[in-house]
Image (tube, rainbow, N blue to C red):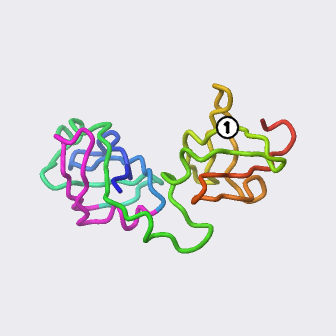
Amino acid sequence: MLLVVGRIGRAHGIRGEATIEVRTDDPDSRLAVGAILQTEPSKKGPLTITSGRVHNGTLLLSFAGVPDRTAVEKLRDVLLIADVDVASESDGDDSFHISQIIGCEVFLENGRKVGVVKDVLSSVGQDTLVILADGVEKLIPFVDAIVPEVDIENKRIVVTPPEGLL
């Protein structure tokens, strides 16, 4: 399955490094030196990663054929896409990919439907489910205490939100 694993941001320095907005749970392998990534728009790629480092908490990557700041700026906002075998990466009942969560129906423990997962926001502290409920987006922290059940096979998630969350 083709999945977005990052987005190219602004240039960093003058030697062709780009800041990367990471959109994967496994940047060490998916954004590793030597990786060949497809792009969106496709005419901007494919791109081969030639170097990578973290600077002040931001991932910086260099690509083959992108020698300087000017070349990086032409790639700004390009999405980086990797071919990921989601099924083979599962390492247990609690392991799933974000793409498997999107579209799941969300229910309270009493069976009342809350809505449908529209997106998953990733952050350092935790992921957050974006639920579309009656045309309104609701944010639910994706933690065991609030999301005790995720059934990927049946596209069903059960939540136990604290009072006032929804």
Q: Quadrant of the N terminus?
A: bottom left
Position of 47 with respect to 118 (left or right) is: left
At horizontal 45% and vertical 70% (from top left) the residue drawn is 89
Number of marks: 1
Reply yes or no: does residue 31 show up in magenta: yes
Q: Between residues 74 and 23, which one lies in front from this camera angle?
A: 23
At horizontal 51% and vertical 54% (from top left) the residue drawn is 100
The amino acid pointed to by label 1 is Gly
At horizontal 24% and vertical 51% (from top left) the residue drawn is 38
Q: How far from the left and from the top, in percent, is residue 28?
A: 40, 66
Q: How far from the left and from the top, in percent, is residue 109?
A: 81, 50
Position of 72 with respect to 138 (left or right) is: left
Q: Between residues 114 and 81, which one lies in front from this camera angle?
A: 114
Q: Between residues 148 and 73, which one lies in front from this camera angle?
A: 148
- Give the residues drawn in magenta, as a range: 26-51
Q: Quadrant of the C terminus?
A: top right
Q: Look at mark 1 in the image and give the residue it sits on.
A: 115
Q: Between residues 131 and 154, which one lies in front from this camera angle?
A: 154
Q: How far from the left and from the top, in percent, is residue 20?
A: 37, 48
Label 1: how many Cα within 10 Å (few below 14, some 14–19, many 20+): many
Q: Is residue 162 above or below residue 92?
A: above
Q: Is residue 88 above or below residue 19?
A: below
At horizontal 70% and vertical 43% (from top left) the residue drawn is 140
